[in-house]
Image (cartoon, grey):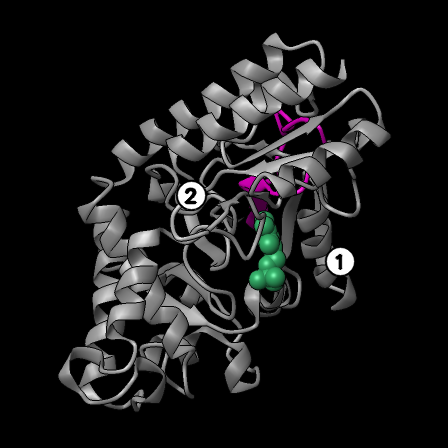
């Protein structure tokens, strides 16, 4: 812990690299010699232009995106994307495939349903309480897109490989594992991520959209609800979430310059999650809830022998400076969210605490 900061295992909003927070703190009253805070600067100024352009450039470099891809920053969170996706891409007679791997996928499906769009749920892991990622999925030939949730924040499962959709573009909710690993972007027509897990503060949603998806999108929509508006105005049709974009830019800089890019970061994430899973699996006190090959590297969900012990565990953990370990209110249990910004030091400290709690309570 530094300066009384806790070990932060929050699911979202979640930990931001300390270095980034310090940089924000240091320049908060006078951004780049402007004499203004980043929160006071016009989004039409060259100061902010530099920020958003730098963020876009870094995203493109990290994911090796060519000119077909547009990087956008929207508001409304990932949840607005649930609605915008069917709204933009499902025109009269079109259909889409959805894979249901948990709460967030279910919400995405619901938004297509509300709009009375054609869609099919081609696979679901609901039969086993969303504890696994479905395999050997049969996709429709005529789908406009396949919607996936790459990491299931609440249930602690993750796609470690993306399915072969036979050329149908994948539209993917990557809110809780964006930039945790390299991606083969050829498969994706659109990816989106609410910022508050792996990118920065809440209030911003990053969207990456490929030109061919844009070409088939519905243009007959309100300006704020169609992607083309954001593409044509570099995300600044109206006032963008300036502070969010600025923080994301600093997080991206941290990924590139401090963490050494996505390959390195993936190795680090595998190492961090591996340490925690190995400890839990070796214990007879703690148990994981996700199936073996579906375990998330970002959200480690686990149980104790009973609910009372879980309550006691959370209370004592909080007293000792470990925050955010309570499972999502819909599922209970415990969850350690270990996004990019979680340090190896914090994981080791957590394991030490878990081991001593086990000793005292088994
Ligand atoms: C947190 C989360 C969301 C919801 O994001 P909002 O920005 O609150 O709308 C959606 N999908 C996934 C996978 C998430 O983790």
Q: Quick check: 201 left or right of 27?
A: right
**Image point (39%, 45%), residue name:** 341
- Circle nearer the viewer, 2 or 1: 2
Q: Could you say which is closer to the camera, residue 282 or residue 234?
A: 282
* The C terminus - image quarter: top right
| In the displayed structure image, the side of residue 173 where residue 111 appears, left or right | right
Give x and y (percent) for residue 322.
57, 40
Query: Is 298 above or below relative to 131?
Result: below
- Towards the viewer: 172 or 238: 238
Q: Is residue 118 above or below residue 162?
A: below
Which residues lie in the magenta part?
A: 130-155
Q: Residues within 10 Å of mark 2 (few under 14, many from 20)?
A: few
Q: Residue furthest left?
A: 33
- The residue lying toward the viewer, choosing from 52 and 142, is 52
Q: Residue drawn at (23%, 41%), measured in percent from left and top?
A: 261
Q: Which residue is mark 1?
A: 110
Q: In which quadrant of this rendering is ligand 1 seen?
A: bottom right
Image point 20% across, 89% down: which residue?
Answer: 35
Q: How many marks?
A: 2
Q: In this rendering, does residue 161 appear at all?
A: no
User: Around disc 1, counting alpha carbons within 10 Å, would you say few (fewer than 14), some (14 to 19), or many (20 or more)?
Assistant: some
Q: Main secondary structure of the magenta part?
A: loop
Q: Quadrant of residue 355?
A: top right
**184 w.r.t. 65: above or below:** above
Q: Which residue has dot 2 on it?
A: 1
Q: Is residue 150 magenta?
A: yes
Question: Is 194 rendered above or below residue 30?
Answer: above
Which structural element holds mark 2? Answer: loop
Identity of the residue drawn at 42% across and 43% down: 1
**Does the magenta segment cover residue 83?**
no
Secondary structure category for the residue under label 1? helix
Image coords of residue 120 (percent x, y): 72, 46
């Amino acid at each position: 812990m530094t300066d009384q900061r806790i070990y932060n295992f929050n699911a979202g909003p979640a930990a931001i690299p300390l270095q980034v927070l310090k940089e924000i703190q240091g320049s908060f009253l006078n951004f780049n010699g402007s004499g203004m805070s980043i929160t006071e600067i016009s989004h039409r100024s060259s100061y902010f232009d530099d920020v958003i352009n730098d963020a876009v450039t870094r995203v493109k470099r990290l994911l090796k995106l060519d000119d077909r891809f547009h990087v956008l920053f929207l508001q409304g969170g990932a949840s607005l994307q649930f609605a915008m996706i069917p709204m933009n891409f499902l025109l009269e007679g079109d259909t889409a495939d959805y894979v249901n791997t948990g709460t967030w996928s279910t919400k995405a499906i619901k938004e297509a349903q509300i709009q009375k769009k054609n869609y099919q749920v081609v696979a679901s892991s609901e039969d086993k309480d969303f504890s696994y990622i479905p395999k050997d999925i049969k996709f429709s030939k005529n789908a406009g897109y396949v919607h996936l949730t790459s990491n299931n924040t609440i249930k602690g499962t993750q796609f470690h490989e993306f399915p072969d959709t036979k050329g149908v573009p994948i539209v993917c909710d990557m809110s809780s594992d964006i930039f945790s690993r390299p991606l083969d972007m050829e498969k994706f027509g659109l990816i989106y991520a609410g910022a508050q897990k792996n990118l920065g503060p809440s209030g911003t949603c990053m969207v990456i959209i490929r030109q061919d998806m844009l070409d088939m999108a519905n243009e007959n929509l309100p300006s704020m609800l169609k992607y083309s508006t954001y593409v044509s105005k570099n995300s600044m049709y109206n006032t963008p979430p300036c502070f969010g974009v600025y923080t994301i830019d600093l997080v991206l800089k941290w990924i590139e310059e401090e963490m050494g890019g996505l390959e390195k970061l993936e190795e680090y994430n595998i190492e961090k999650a591996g340490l925690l899973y190995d400890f839990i699996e070796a214990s007879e006190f703690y148990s994981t809830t996700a199936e073996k090959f579906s375990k998330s590297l970002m959200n480690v969900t686990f149980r104790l022998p009973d609910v009372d012990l879980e309550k006691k565990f959370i209370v004592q953990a909080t007293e000792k400076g470990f925050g955010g370990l309570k499972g999502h209110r819909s599922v209970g249990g415990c969850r350690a969210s270990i996004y990019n910004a979680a340090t190896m030091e914090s994981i080791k400290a957590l394991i030490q605490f878990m081991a001593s709690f086990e000793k005292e309570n088994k």
